[in-house]
Amino acid sequence: MASEGDKPQIEPPPASYKSAVWEHFGFPIRYSSDGHKNVDKTVTVCKICMTRVPYSQGNTTNMTGHLRRHHPRVDSSRAQVRPKQFQQHTLPSAFKQPLSSHSDKHKTITKALGVFIAKDIQPYSVVDDAGFQHLIKTLEPRYEIPSRAHFSSKIIPELYDETRSKIENKLANAKHVALTTDSWTSRATESYLTVTAHYISDWQLESAVLQTCPLFENHTSSHLADALMSAVTDWKLERPNITIPVTTDNARNMVNAIKEAAGLGPQIGCFAHILNLAAKKAVALQQTSRLLGKVRKVVAFFHKSTTAANALKVKQEMLNIPAHKLIHDTPTRWNTIYDMMERYLEQQPAIYSALMDKNIKKNVKDIAVLSDSELTLAEEMIQLLKPLKTTTTLLSTETAPSLSMVLPLKTMILKSMDPADHDSPAIKDAKAAISEDLKSRYTDPDLQDYLNRASFLDPRFKSLPNLDAALCLNVCSGVIREIIEQQGQPVAAEAGPSGSQNPPESPPVKKSAMSELFGDFFRAPDKTKTFDNIVEEEVMSYKAEDSIDTDAYPLAWWELHESKYPHVAKLAKQYLCVCATSVPSERVFSTAGDIVSASRSRLATENVNKLIFLQKNMKI
């Protein structure tokens, strides 16, 4: 037995050790030279005599035998379960106790990490990264990070369900919903169809990415129609007696899909895509194409050569020119051609000076700067394409109505394409190419009528300056008819033939003193007006209002005037939520490219949908 002075420090056994012998035994504690505490769990120490007894995990035979031989008065068989001992932790040790996975704090941190993964497009494997684990341990040492499988199978699905529920509630309260859709192919060569919804709530334009579903079949119009109808049904978007307008690109299969899908329509061709096609025809003309070829060679040279790029920086500083990098165009987007030419013109002095540098000149092959005539053509093309560039940027917004601008902008662009006496032959050809392409767009009479009504219901364009008086009147009449059909009773029938027998005349009613005195001067409103008359007067009164400034926010105007024009306001919500472009769906592509990256190309399609959904819709 150990002497009093040799008594070791004893660590109590864990609470999970239930045998009664543990009332009399513990584990010895030793301290290293640097003061670090070590608990030896290969032996136990008898609290009665301080004797060390060998111990193997889960086996209490040695301790029971020790009690029987040396301490027979102690009955270790009395209690089958060791009573729970209360142990008050010191303040430092309390902070070292790990957080229970069921505690509120642990759940809050885990949910926050799920938000971080979804919102910042992080891979699930980030929870295994050493630097990330170090950060979490520094912020909360007691928190144990769950596995990546826990996030992918539990946390992200829970966040998805929570966010989806909120959006479903908003969509259920929206009387009118419009869609945009487009398809794309991931890095893993899997095809997806993205659908976005747009609606007006409290006179604010709201939008949500509904789903990004895989397309396993060929992209025929019937398969696309089925996929769209599945989204409409899944999200409960059907509205009685109202079709859902859909904005898509101008691909034939997508146009036909909207026509085939019951309850969808009209199909609105993406105006940005239309402008892209028109501008491409202009820049594909021979003289312009040759000009762009020379610019591309110069830009590619400075992108590939680090020596040339450094020389360009030196010349930019020397000539006091903005230190901007040259822009290379993307074949599928004409606006990058505009940006490339604009940046080239800005940097032209620095480019010329850098190419003439003796250290650069010897490496320059088949590269020539633009001649004076080509520089002039480039400047003229920039001026020609500027309205199209501005229009594309303007229509790409998701926070303001855009469909109402389509026909007014088309009219303004066509007007800017009228030939001028000072135009060069190349510019005249470019203007003709753009005009010819734009004039063939939105020519369907029903679609034109729909777009004109959208413009009329926007207080910025309700005067319809792009139409003559007769067409303006037709648009007003169409709006009146639509309000009556949707919101009230049918148009009142005209009076029957006058040959019917007249009812007998009633005796004149005796007038009161008040009636005799005031007569018709203060007559009460005529309560016999039909709903048709009320709507017609409301629409014509709205038409007579002054248009607001084009920089004003039309939905703010409607919020102030809804009580004055309640029937027109309801129809305005239906039209002004429709997008002029499919850009909201196309924006998902870049997000999806970050999610389905090279390191995560095998991500399951279900996870792709949930991660895109959360990144676009979750509010933090």
Image (tube, grey):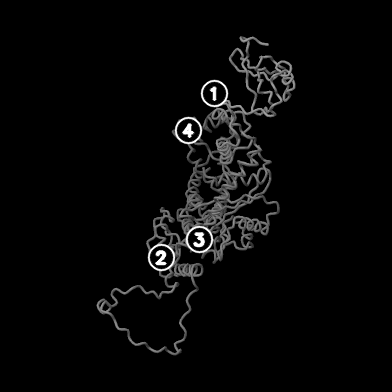
Circles 1, 2 touching at the beta carbon (< 8 Å): no
Q: Residues within 10 Å of mark 4 (few under 14, many from 20)?
A: many
To which quarter of the image does residue 149 belong?
Answer: top right
Residue 448 at least partly seen: yes
Of residues 33 and 332, which is closer to you in this image?
33
| Foreground tag (3 vs 2) | 3
Q: How many marks?
A: 4
Q: Sequence order check: which comes first, mark 4 or mark 1?
A: 1
| Foreground tag (3 vs 1) | 1
Residue beneath disc 4: 316
Residue beneath disc 3: 574
Please give left or right for residue 590 compared with residue 494 in the image: right
Residue beneath disc 2: 543
* Mark 3 and mark 4: Cα distance apart in space: 52 Å
**Which residue is painted at 44% across and 33% down in the image?**
320
For badge 2, the amino acid type reads: Lys
Of residues 161 and 90, which is closer to you in this image?
90
Give percent across and percent down for residue 71.
70, 17
